[in-house]
Image (cartoon, rainbow, N blue to C red):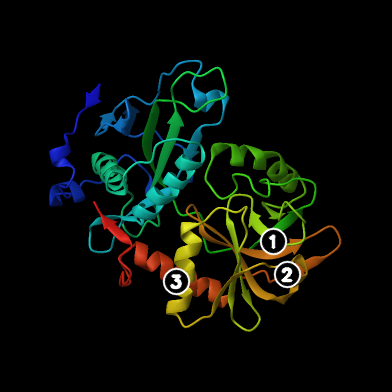
C-alpha cells in the first residue's frame, strides 16, 4: 500500500499533535543499533532525465531487474544521518544538507544524476514526519537513524552507468551507542589490507568501500580489537582512517589534528567537531599524520554518525603500542557533550545545523 504525499505538502512542519505522538510499545531504554521495521520508507525515482517528487511506501522490500547496475557494477552509494527529539519537544535532523552534498559527490563519481539539495532535505523531512512516533523520547539518549540509499536500477550487461536510479530513504530508532559512559577501546593498525586505492573511491560513500573493510575488521576483532585503523594505501606511512570512522586526535599541546588524505571519506561528524573545537578556542590542523606521530597524542577518537566519538585506549602496530588511557579524556568528553548538546537542543545551534521537521 502506498501513502502518496504531494509536492504541496513538502514544506509543512510537524503539528503539535504529531510531535506529542510517541510509541508506547517500544522499550526505548533497550534500543541498540540494529534494523527495525517502521511504518514507511520514501522512494524517489529518476527516469527519463528527471527525479519524481517521491512516494512514501509501506512495504519493506524492493523489486528490480536482475541486470541492475547496482548489483553488477557497484552503482550504489548511501548516507547516514539522524533525527533527534529535542529538549523543547521539536524533532530536528542534524545537517541533512551536508549529507545531500556528499551523496551528490558519490553520485557524480559513479556517473549518476545528482539530486537537488532542497529536494533531498524535503524527502528526509517527509519520511521522518511519517515515522515521527518512532523518534525516541528526549532523555532516552536515542535518535532516529536515517539511511538514504542511492542505486542504479536500470539493466546493463556491458560496463556502463544506468539510465534509471532510485533514492530510497529508510529510518529506524536506535539507542545510544554507549550505555554507561564512553569507554575507550583498543585499535589495531591493519598492515596487510587497504580500505581504498590511492586515487580510488575512498573519498565517497560507496557500498563497495565497506565491503572491502569487512575482512580486515573481522581479523581485528578476532585479535581482540573492536576497531581497525588503516594507513594510507600508497605508502602505509600515514594515518588514513578507522574502518568505519574518521581519525582525529588531541595533541599533547591541545591541537585538534585530523588526516588530510585523498583516500578518506569526508566525515560530516568530523567537520562539525572541527568547528566546535575552533569555537572552544582550539587550534585545528588538517594535515598528513605520520604513523610515528601516534605517540604525540594525548587523546584519540574515532568519529562518525552512529557513535559521534569512540575514544581509543591504545593503538597497536606491528612493532609498537601507543597508549592513551583507559578513561575517556577531558577534551573528547567536552567535544562529545558539545555536539550532542546541539543535537538535542540543550545548547544553542549557533551555526544553523539543525533542520526542523
Eyeballing the image, is 181 above or below 136? below
Which image quadrant: the N terminus?
top left
What residue would you read off at disc 2?
294
**Tag 3 secondary structure:** helix
The residue depicted at 51 percent of the width and 81 percent of the height is 282
Q: Is residue 322 visible?
A: yes
**Tag 1 secondary structure:** strand
Q: Earlier in the sequence, mark 3 or mark 1?
A: 1
What residue would you read off at disc 1?
239
Q: Earlier in the sequence, mark 2 or mark 3?
A: 3
What residue would you read off at disc 3?
275
Observer-nearest of 274 and 199: 199
Please tell me in which quadrant of the rendered image residue 164 appears.
top left
Please tell me in which quadrant of the rendered image residue 74 appears.
top right
Please tell me in which quadrant of the rendered image residue 219 appears.
top right
Task: Check disc 2: other Cα within 10 Å, few if <14, some if 14-19, many if 20+.
Answer: many
Q: Which mark is nearer the camera, 2 or 1?
A: 1
Task: Check disc 3: other Cα within 10 Å, few if <14, some if 14-19, many if 20+.
Answer: some
Amino acid at each position: 500500500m502506498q501513502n502518496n504525499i504531494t509536492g504541496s505538502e513538502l514544506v509543512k512542519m510537524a503539528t503539535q499533535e504529531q510531535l506529542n505522538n510517541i510509541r508506547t510499545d517500544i522499550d526505548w531504554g533497550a534500543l541498540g543499533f540494529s534494523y527495525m521495521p517502521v511504518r514507511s520508507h520514501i522512494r524517489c525515482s529518476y527516469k527519463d532525465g528527471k527525479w519524481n517528487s517521491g512516494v512514501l511506501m509501506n512495504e519493506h522490500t524492493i523489486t528490480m531487474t536482475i541486470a541492475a547496475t547496482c548489483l553488477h557494477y557497484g552503482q550504489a552509494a548511501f548516507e547516514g544521518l539522524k533525527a533527534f527529539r529535542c529538549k523543547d519537544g521539536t524533532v530536528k535532523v542534524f545537517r541533512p544538507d551536508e549529507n545531500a552534498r556528499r551523496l551528490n559527490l558519490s553520485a557524480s563519481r559513479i556517473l549518476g544524476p545528482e539530486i537537488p539539495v532542497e529536494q533531498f532535505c524535503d524527502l528526509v523531512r517527509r519520511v521522518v514526519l511519517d515515522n515521527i512516533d518512532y523518534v525516541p523520547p528526549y532523555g532516552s539518549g536515542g535518535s532516529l537513524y536515517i539511511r538514504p540509499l542511492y542505486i542504479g536500477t536500470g539493466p546493463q550487461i556491458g560496463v556502463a552507468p544506468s539510465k534509471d536510479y532510485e533514492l530510497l530513504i529508510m529510518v529506524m530508532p536506535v539507542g545510544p551507542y554507549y550505555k554507561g559512559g564512553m569507554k575507550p577501546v583498543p585499535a589495531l593498525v591493519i598492515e596487510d589490507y587497504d580500505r581504498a586505492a590511492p586515487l580510488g573511491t575512498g573519498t565517497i560513500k560507496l557500498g563497495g568501500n565497506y565491503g572491502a573493510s569487512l575482512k580486515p575488521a573481522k581479523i581485528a576483532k578476532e585479535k581482540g580489537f573492536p576497531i581497525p585503523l588503516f594507513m594510507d594505501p600508497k605508502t602505509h606511512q600515514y594515518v588514513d582512517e578507522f574502518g568505519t570512522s574518521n581519525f582525529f586526535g588531541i595533541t599533547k599541546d591541545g591541537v585538534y589534528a585530523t588526516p588530510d588524505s585523498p583516500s578518506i571519506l569526508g566525515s560530516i561528524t568530523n567537520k562539525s567537531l572541527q568547528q566546535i573545537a575552533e569555537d572552544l578556542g582550539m587550534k585545528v590542523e588538517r594535515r598528513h599524520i605520520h604513523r610515528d606521530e601516534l605517540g604525540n597524542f594525548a587523546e584519540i577518537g574515532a568519529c562518525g554518525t552512529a557513535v559521534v566519538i569512540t575514544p581509543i585506549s591504545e593503538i597497536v602496530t606491528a612493532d609498537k603500542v601507543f597508549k592513551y588511557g583507559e578513561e575517556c579524556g577531558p577534551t573528547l568528553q567536552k567535544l562529545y557533550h558539545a555536539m550532542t548538546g546541539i543535537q538535542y537542543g540543550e545548547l544553542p545551534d549557533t551555526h544553523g545545523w539543525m533542520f526542523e521537521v
